Amino acid sequence: MAYRAAAVDNLGLQGPYITSNTETVNVGWVTIGGPAESMGSKAVPFDFAFSVSVSGQSSTGAITASAALDGKQVYSGTPNAGEQVTIPIKTHLLGAGTHTVEVQASKDDYLPASKRYTFTVPAVTIPDGGVGALAQDPAGRAVFHTTLAQRCIGRDGVDIQAQMDALAARVKTLEG
């Protein structure tokens, strides 16, 4: 397909015709719409959204679609053409580095589609010794932050860290 157009000014004078580049129009292909294929750095959880459709068809229902995050299926369904599918991506549960979301779509005898989207989870660097920060109270004395284990309350209201310390003391006593 190509377009041919001419400009006309306010006086009705017409300029020369210009023809656009010729583009091939493919009808009957399944298409996948979404963000840029390289999504960049994602430090916090985000929603990955995509949609599927069939070229040349204004309304098509039940297009089979699936999405996998790093090879593990996170979505499988049959959305209608143009319907947005949203998948929450929890970056805090992923390791640092590059991750891939692969989307595949098909419909009857139409040509199927697949697309790969990549994003990077940045590494969190902790100083040697596992201390993330030094804290002081108003008098200048060191303040030690609680750990996640200390904040998890277990049996009888005793935190997990205290239970582990007590267990370690019992085991040490049994060993002699």
Image: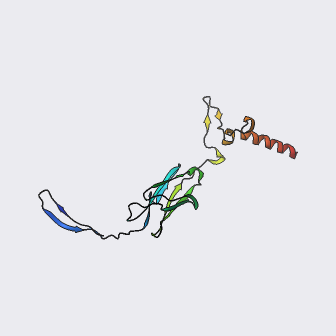
Quadrant in which residue 136 is drawn: top right
Of 112 and 2, the residue lying toward us: 112
Say whether residue 124 is visible.
Answer: no
Quadrant of image for the N terminus: bottom left
Quadrant in which residue 59 is drawn: bottom left
Q: Position of residue 85 (x, y in %)?
A: 48, 55
Residue found at the very far left of the displayed protein: 11
Q: Is residue 32 above or below residue 1?
A: above
Q: Is residue 26 left or right of residue 171?
A: left
Quadrant of image for the C terminus: top right
Q: Position of residue 55 (x, y in %)?
A: 39, 65
Please say which color scheme the image uses: rainbow
- Which residue corresponds to the image point at 60% horizontal and 51% vertical from the top-left? 93
Of 109 and 42, the residue lying toward us: 109
Q: Position of residue 122 (x, y in %)?
A: 54, 53
- Which residue corresponds to the image point at 51% horizontal and 50% vertical from the top-left? 46
- Which residue corresponds to the image point at 64% horizontal and 43% vertical from the top-left? 131
Residue found at the very far right of the displayed protein: 176
Of 66 and 58, the residue lying toward us: 58
Residue found at the very far top of the displayed protein: 139
Q: Position of residue 52 (x, y in %)?
A: 45, 60
Say whether residue 164 is visible.
Answer: yes
